[in-house]
Amino acid sequence: MKIDKRITSFDDHLDEQYGKLGTESREKFQEEFETFKIGILIQEARKKQNLTQEQLAERVGTTKNYISRIENNASDIRLSTLMRIIREGLGGSLKFSLDV
């Protein structure tokens, strides 16, 4: 069986594209990826509850545009706003983990 040596691991790909762990460019990528994931999680939870962005915004006291920007990773989100979206808007809870 012949192995294609052009295939690399995802970590190798990230190292090549964004630098090794601990570099400024890789840290920036990781941070942006985390905010992207938050937006996707909110969007999935909203859709699972058959809510429009406008309905979620009304529950939370914000605008449809702001919810859209969060879901599309176009806006930084304050922790207090994130908690309000999850608790009041989606009826959920937020759990954190810390890797040191």
Image (cartoon, rainbow, N blue to C red):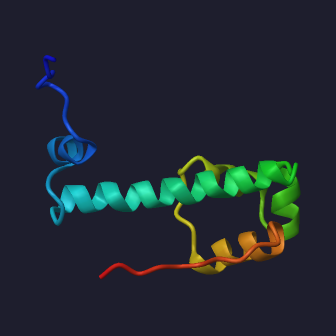
Looking at the rendered image, the quarter that the C terminus falls into is: bottom left
Asked whether, in this view, residue 80 is left or right of residue 90, the answer is left
> Is residue 71 positioned above or below 1 on the image?
below
Q: Position of residue 10 (x, y in %)?
A: 27, 43
- Look at the image and tell me in which quarter the N terminus lies: top left
* Residue located 23% across and 48% down the image: 11
- Judged left or right of residue 79, residue 25 is left
Asked if residue 64 is positioned above or below residue 4 in the image, the reply reads below
User: Would residue 61 be seen by someone viewing this image from the given angle?
Assistant: no
Residue in the foreground of this view, choosing between 6 and 2: 2
Q: What residue is drawn where x is 57% and y is 74%?
A: 78
Measured as percent of width and height from the top left, residue 40 is found at 60, 51
- Residue 67 is situated, as x and y percent measured from the top left of the image, at 70, 56
Which of the two residues, 70 or 97, is positioned nearer the viewer here?
A: 97
Q: Residue furthest top?
A: 2
Residue 46 falls in which quadrant of the image?
Answer: bottom right
Q: Residue furthest front?
A: 1
Q: Position of residue 29 (x, y in %)?
A: 31, 54
Q: How many marks?
A: 0
| Quarter of the image where one finds residue 83 | bottom right
Q: Left or right of 68: which side holds 59?
A: right
**Residue 31 visible somewhere in the drawing:** yes
Asked if residue 41 lies left or right of residue 19, the reply is right
Residue at 56% in and 60% down: 38
